[in-house]
Amino acid sequence: MNNFKLDSRLENDCFILSESEQFVFLLMNNSLVPWFILVPKTDKTELYELDIVKQTEILDAINKVSDFIYDEFRPDKLNIAAIGNIVNQMHIHIVGRYKTDTYWPGVVWGASEKQAYKLSEVEKIKAKSNNILEL
């Protein structure tokens, strides 16, 4: 999508880890849980609006991000959601959850307690996740 622009709220709340022709891969700036966001480059706001090929590409990318989170962070559970109530741009949250995390068993969405990443931590995660979007 040539005229793709990342929503300013995602840009302000996240670090860009990588970008491909189809996606932007983000890290939410909250080190309390491993929280990643996959942004498909589309002007559609709902998954069902996409053709099955594009939906399959997104599912494949979600699976790759999920594998990465399990391999690197060993969570007890994954939360995967495409909510979009505040940020209308299509984006998928993929969050590693622990029974001991600050938010458990509730949701991470809209919670006020946060802890910013150190830039060195972001760089490590960026290096480890460098090839995820090679679809």
Image (cartoon, grey):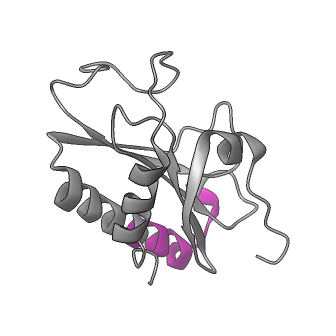
Nearer-the-camera pick, 115 or 78: 115
Quarter of the image with the N terminus in it: bottom right
Extreme residue toward the bottom, this view: 135
**Which residue sits at x=71%, y=58%?**
44
**Which residue sits at x=42%, y=74%?**
130
Name above or below for residue 133 compared with residue 92. below
Queried whether the magenta region covers residue 54, the answer comes back as yes
Extreme residue toward the right, this view: 3
Residue 38, horizontal then vertical, whole percent: 51, 58
To which quarter of the image does residue 83 belong?
A: top right
- Total labels drawn: 0
Name above or below for residue 50 compared with residue 118. below
Left or right of 61, for residue 98: left
Residue 107, horizontal then vertical, whole percent: 37, 24
**Which residue sits at x=47%, y=18%?**
111
To which quarter of the image does residue 22 belong?
A: bottom right
Nearer-the-camera pick, 64 or 53: 64
Extreme residue toward the top, this view: 112
**Which residue sits at x=41%, y=26%?**
108
Q: Which residues are magenta?
A: 48-60
Left or right of 46, for residue 71: left
Left or right of 124, for residue 71: left
